[in-house]
Amino acid sequence: MRITKTLAALAAGAMALAACGSDTVSAGPDADSGYDTSKISTVREIADLVPERVKSDGKLTFGTNLYWPPAGFYASDGTSPIGYDVDLMKALAAVMGLKPDIQQAEFASIMPGIPQRYEMGVSAITITSDRQKNFTMIQYYTVGTAWAVGKGNPTHFNPKNICGKTIGVQSGTLQDDAIAKMAKACDNPPDIQRYDKQNAVTQVLIGGKVDAMAADTSVIQYALTQARGTLETIGDVTDSAPQGVVVGKGDAQMSKATQAALQYLMDKGILKGIFAKWGIKDNVASQALINPVK
């Protein structure tokens, strides 16, 4: 769940997880293929909604972080972006009659770069009431928080009592912030090991260097196909929240175009097809709601 400085609490939860320790993730023979967006045609009435300043160069510029599988990461060639958010960006651009310009960015820099640097932000971004004050966010998916431990839980980790444990987490996420808040209640606080890339967090858990890790349920679901029996889940899924595409606040025309494009992908079953390609079959939105958090 990609969010910074949230007050959300973290209890625990999950499903099994594993992945490579490099910047790529191996997922079998179809790992690099993703969803075939080449057959998605321009929808003229939606393309006509796109502001002239956006479509004048023929491309749609996205800010995203490519170290968060399965939302966005690099293929086995180390350079090609893949993942469900990458497929979504390609699909949105296609419906709008534009070419996708997908730019890797540190997660914390994506939203501040909208709309001056990026026309959209798509990077498993959690919708919050605070963010809605400064950006327009259109929902397409819902995720929760999950925990993973080594097979057999060798260190007897309890997600309801993290005191004294060593925990791995990606910097700047909901889980990072919530674990830090939980730690304040400990006389013997946990050793929180933060990494810029989710793959690095997974690697240290597989290597036994941390007792547990917390991540999005989507990350967990995808990694179930990678685990090979080395990891397992513990606790329950918690902190469900919507994710959304981000556009500039007050840009009514771009908001309308983005909502229409997302709704089209939902109505045609394309969005569900994208997520299914990455092993995710639940919690895909059927309505492209604007700023849904009350």
Image: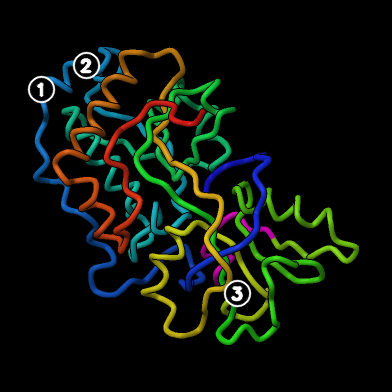
**Mark seen at residue 205:** 3
Q: Residue 161: x, y in percent?
A: 75, 67
* Identity, as a three-letter code, of the amino acid under mark 1: Arg
Tell me where residue 219 appears, x and y as whole percent.
45, 60
Q: How many marks?
A: 3
Viewer can see residue 104: no
- Front residue of 79/18: it is 18
Indicate whether 179 appears above or below 251: below
Q: Which residue in the structure is indicated by mark 2?
A: 49
In 3D space, how far apart are the residues under numbered discs 3 and 2 (Cα atoms)?
A: 47 Å
Residue named by callout 1: 44
Q: Disc 3 on helix, strand or loop?
A: helix
Look at label 3 and name its amino acid: Leu
- Mark 2 is on which residue type? Leu
What are the residue bounds of the magenta stretch?
A: 194-203
Q: CA distance from mark 1 to mark 3?
A: 48 Å
In the depicted structure, whether residue 210 falls above or below residue 283: below
